Amino acid sequence: MSHQVCLRAAIITMLGLITVPSSYSQSVRTGAMVLADAQFDRLQGMRVGLVVNHTARVGEEHLINLVHAAPGVSLAALFGPEHGLRGLEEDGVSIADGIDDLTGAPVYSLYGTNRRPTPAMLADVDVLVFDIQDVGARFYTFISTMGLAMQSAAESGIPFIVLDRPNPLSGSYVSGFVLEPDQSSFVGMYPIPIAHGLTIGELAQMIRGEALMPGLDSLNLEVIRMENWERHMQWPDTGLPWVNTSPNIPDFMTALVYPGTCFFESTSASEGRGTPTPFTLVGAPWADPAALVRTLTGYALPGVSFEGVTFTPEPTEGMDTNPKLSGELLGGLRITVTSRRDYRPVETGIHIFHTFYRAAPNPDQFLSRPHWLARLSGTVRLEQMLSTAGPAAIVDSWQQEVEAFSRVARLYHLYD
């Protein structure tokens, strides 16, 4: 069967009890760690469906292995999001169902024919458990998968448990346009800012509590909280190792820059795919690197520096085998975060995007997919303002909606 899932990490057992690896002594303990420490008592006697990918780690072990080994717990089904259960598939690649060779559990793709578990998939499931590391950006599709899985759980009358994980950007950075209803899609299902400042568990509570999706009134939702996480923490403050959340987010610094440079996916320019440093490298065949650097340096943006570069995107196994502008020499920028605490991803991205738009010989050709820019930004206003306003005015335009969102979001905060 194609796309079968082979998870070959060892199952650790001793005297009939799970031995959770002692290699994680970090200050922050994820919800999965907390659940494993409690010997999965919350799942005793239950047939468990796991919505997970390769980021569902507990120390050196995968959550799948530990649940499979847990006495009194039955692993009934596995559900994988975009990029697959192992996180190896490229963006947008449809993924087939399969069987997990290690556990024998069925593996259902939620990024193929189905985007959500069907009643048949949940027929032998007593509880649905979600454990996927998010990056804190609205257009990262894992949070859409979570909401759709919540709907399925509600319809099947089974509990939905979120094992909470850190927001890598912190819980205090909130920025970007709030999604407008007309722009709802799989890359943006909820009226939240681009950088929403919530953990995955807090967001789940808000989705249900504010009825951001229909059909969740009856959902039995539980969040297993992290320990020792605080809102000001960015990923490096957690002490947790970074696991690539997707093929083109190989490290925290890429995740930090991504909410601003993802806009380039809507253009004929390169967002750096096909290079070892996607999203921190942007360019176009017509771009003048020195001129771009002069303009952006003049804005004196905090926590960042710009270097003029030339580069050539090439097919890259395991990241992008068909990048935009493959084989073409491009001029552009390398974005270097000099102070992660001062860096403002979305604001910086708007300045970079605006600078490219204004420098393009043909702005309409540069903005080759305006409908996708509206989906990513959450509004048609960004396209309209590119030709009529400066980047600072664009940033100012979303402040009131972000403040209104933040007032409501605070009701769902689980951490100080």
Image: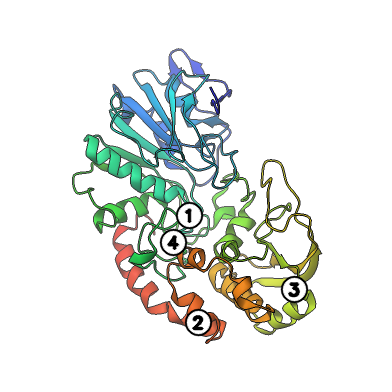
Question: Marks 2 and 1: which is nearer the front?
Answer: 2
Sooner in the amino-acid sequence: mark 2 or mark 4? 4
- Residue 124: x and y, percent? 30, 23
Sooner in the amino-acid sequence: mark 2 or mark 1? 1
Task: Give the quadrant of the C terminus.
Answer: bottom left
Q: Residue at x 47, y 57 (%)?
A: 139
Give me the disc on residue 385. Answer: 2
Q: Amino acid at mark 2?
A: Met
Sooner in the amino-acid sequence: mark 1 or mark 4? 1
In the image, is residue 99 above or below residue 211? above
Name the secondary structure under disc 2: helix
- Residue 246: x and y, percent? 58, 46
Q: Residue at x 28, y 61 (%)?
A: 411
Looking at the image, do the residues carrying marks 1 and 4 touch, with CB atoms under 8 Å apart? Answer: yes
Sooner in the amino-acid sequence: mark 3 or mark 2? 3
In the image, is residue 210 above or below residue 17? below
Give me the disc on residue 197. Answer: 4
